Image (cartoon, rainbow, N blue to C red):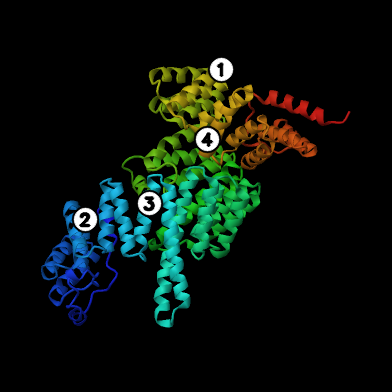
Amino acid sequence: MAAACGHAPPREEPQSPRAAADLDAAPSPEAGIEPQPWVSPRAYRHYLAALLARDRDDHGTAAVELHEALVFDPDSAHLRTLYAQELARLGRMNEAREEAETALKRSPDHAPAHLLLARIAVNEERLDDARGQFRAAIHGEPDDGDAYRDLLHLEVSTGNLPAARAVLENLEAVAREHTLDAEGADNDVTGEEAVTGSRLRENASSGWVELGSAFAARHADSEADEAFARAERIDPGTGDGLLARASYLEGRRRFGEARVLYLRLVARRPESPGVLASLSRVSLQEGQPDVAEAHLRKLVQLAGEMDGEGQDRDADRRELTAALFRAALPLLGANRVEAAQAAFEACLRLFPAHPELSFYRALAIDSRGNHREAAQLFEALDGALADGSESRAEADRSAQRGPSFLAGEPATIVVDARTQAALSRSRLGEHAEGAKRMRALFAERPQDEAVGLGLIEALERDGHLVDAVSILAAAARAQPRSEAILFALASAQDRAGKQQSAFGTMRKVLALSPHHAGALNYVGYSLVEKHESLEEAERLLAEAVDQRPDDGAVADSYGTCLLRRGKVPAALAELSRAQNLSPGDPVILEHLGEALLASGKREEAGSAFRKALAVLEPSVGRSRKAREGRDPEPSDARVRAEILQKLRTLTPR
């Protein structure tokens, strides 16, 4: 709260003793006129000492010096408000409130005092009082954007978006007035008016971004669109409104519109890591993986140019590394593994020994089919993160300097590294070793969802899927409220052909964790397959897509549901997106073919069906590399039969 109450510094610079003496004959309190900030010669030394102490964050000394200054200038609302601000920074809120109220008795329209009282009222949850004080601050000093922005925060946080909009309309009108005044004024005042107008426009623009985000959270899309557009129109120079609107459109899966805005931004900021990463992600969603890789290569190039620079650039390194990660992860899921690996390696040049980045580099290597190398890297990472080791200390330092992505602290990566090491061994053909490791790890960490899912894969590869069901069922009986164990159990039941049991278990997961993306996807898609409760299925799957926007399997489930509900254009768009995110998946290709057929695109539908068959029945001439990354699924025979039947309906007799 002390920090929240503390950013209303005086606008003037300290007066010289000569200037202060000239102001000594300030208006008296009885005059009823708002006095200009002034400091008498006797108070000036204490005033200056207070400002210097505040600059070095010595608020105790600042408060003492301002208290001394008030001995000489007891009627100064300016000094008394500064004193109240320092008391607030020190946590002495009751005293701060009393001093601010005393300042207002001397000068009823003193805006900084009203603003401080408003912030104190917000902290004490006296929101109506806070609103009144914010409005009084705006009335007293209509050119100061702080009171507008704080009142906007209050209205948005309480959900009163119409009131927030009214605040911004007022702020925008004041900014426009100053801009017009600057255009028509003489040279002596043009600069000041222009600066004031620019500052107010920046406040209004960022305010519309905030309000647009609040509308977007409510799924009030037209209001959000308008708010973001106004932010850009008011202050186009910063690009903040444009970026906010592009991000919003991307989140709404309006990728074409988002891409246009990102391209406008990249024309202004050709080396902006965040914009390049967003362009890469949007390009992938639109089915342009080569373009996505091109943007990623630009980020890798920027990382190469930053190599060898000092620690003073760590903020830039973190920004660039985060952008590389954001762009690389969806490409990894879309089987653009080589590009993703290059991105992770570029990140590691910026932050060597960063444990999370090391983990994802190994994951990319495993995805390329290099299971032995990946297993060795995961095992080395496990060893490097051992408590007390010098390598652990180095990893901790690198993680603290660099950004954190999904795993958080380095210690949390150990379990993931052990899981992936066991699975890489299993994929390498060391099935018994992989199963042995996963049994031991699950006994140690049964509540880790990734461990439970790893146990299923390892035991299935070892020919003991039934054991996985038994182990997980026993764990669920011991811990019936663990959504992680229940989700793994349901997944094992599904793999074992017990779909009815799996469906019931997934319902239990949703009862415990209503936003669990995996359970939402499973239950929703199961309803679609049964042609039951399609309205509920659409609701569940829409939530799953919101939780996992880059997951091709989830997009496929949602698109198939839309198709079953007769929403053909929306289904085709979502299934095309699913294919872009997970290219070559035969089930997605089958569903995409159905959507194309429903759209009257018979030739394209036939092409999608034939591609799916090619994945299910790789020809002898196909290289091993072309077949990597996909193991046969129990449902392959059924999918193949369905696709053949659909192709026969397309073949002229």
Choose top left, top right, bottom left or bottom right for residue 383: top left
The location of residue 245, given as percent across then percent down, is 53, 53
Mark found first going from the N terminus, 2 or 4: 2
Q: Which mark is residue 88?
A: 2
- Crowd around label 1: few <14 · some 14–19 · many ≥20 (10 Å): few
Mark found first going from the N terminus, 1 or 4: 1
Disc 2 marks a residue whose amino acid type is Ala
Residue nearest the viewer, comparing 159 with 30 = 30
Q: Which residue, given by chain and number where applicable, does mark 1 sit on?
A: 500
Element type at mark 4: helix
Disc 3 marks a residue whose amino acid type is His
Q: CA distance from mark 1 to mark 4?
A: 23 Å
Q: CA distance from mark 4 to mark 3?
A: 28 Å
Indicate which label's residue lies in the foreground, 2 or 1: 2
Q: Which residue, given by chain and number where applicable, does mark 4 sit on?
A: 543
Q: Which residue, given by chain and number where applicable, does mark 3 sit on?
A: 153
Q: Quadrant of the C terminus?
A: top right
The location of residue 356, given as percent across then percent down, is 44, 45
Q: Is residue 127 above or below residue 168?
A: above
Marks 2 and 3 close (CB-CB < 8 Å): no
Q: CA distance from mark 2 to mark 1?
A: 61 Å
- Crowd around label 4: few <14 · some 14–19 · many ≥20 (10 Å): many
Q: CA distance from mark 2 to mark 4?
A: 44 Å
Element type at mark 1: helix
Element type at mark 2: helix
